[in-house]
Image (tube, rainbow, N blue to C red):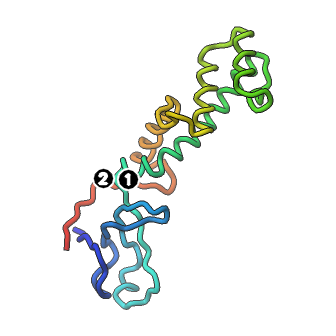
Amino acid sequence: MSRCITKIQRTGEFTQGSIFSNFVDHGGVSCLGLVVSARCDIEQSKYKYITVLPVYALEDWVIEYGDFLAREKAIESLKTQIADSLAKCDLPEDSISIYGEEPTINAIQNKKGSAKLIDKIKQYKILVDHGHGWREANTLLAEKKGLIKDIINGRQTGLYFLAQIQLISA
């Protein structure tokens, strides 16, 4: 069992596998820190720096970082869906960037295009502009669910799910 370290006083107080509380990551987010530097290097004081992996509660990570990853995926997904749907309406796939959102929506309505396409365009605009309610956009919520599922099932490169870390304060 790892013990929770809140402040380093001297060498030998931590080793590989030690967990720091109140660790601050590169983005300024407070989380736990798991020491992964080699145990022998730590024991022999052969380090200038130690390597610490940030460990987040899933909910905290999603709020701080996951929303933005899911947002990027949602934007790319919507772009593809919108381009395909615009082509079906005989409109250029880059209509929004050429004519703007409203003229494109009007053209879709004139061609009896689907309300789903118009909704996708509005969601896309909200996500791209970080507009009001962007965190609640349906496409983003679906991407977030997929991202969390991928993390838990080990399919998200560079992110790992640890079922539980039990901490004992020193």
Q: Residue at x 45, y 81 (%)?
A: 49
Q: Which mark is residue 34?
A: none
**Label 1 packing within 10 angstroms: few (<14), some (14-19), many (20+):** some
Residue 3 found in image quarter: bottom left
- Position of 78 relative to 36 (above/below): above
Query: Hey, which quadrant is residue 111 in on the image?
Result: top right
What residue is drawn where x is 49% and y is 29%?
138
Q: Give the number of callouts.
A: 2
Q: Is residue 14 left or right of residue 147?
A: left
Quarter-wise, where is residue 125 in the image?
top right
Instruction: Verify CB contact (< 8 Å) between mark 1 and mark 2.
Output: yes
Q: Position of residue 41 (x, y in %)?
A: 40, 85
Residue extending furthest toward the front: 132
Residue pointed to by mark 1: 161
Q: Residue at x 37, y 60 (%)?
A: 55
Q: Is residue 49 above or below residue 2?
A: below
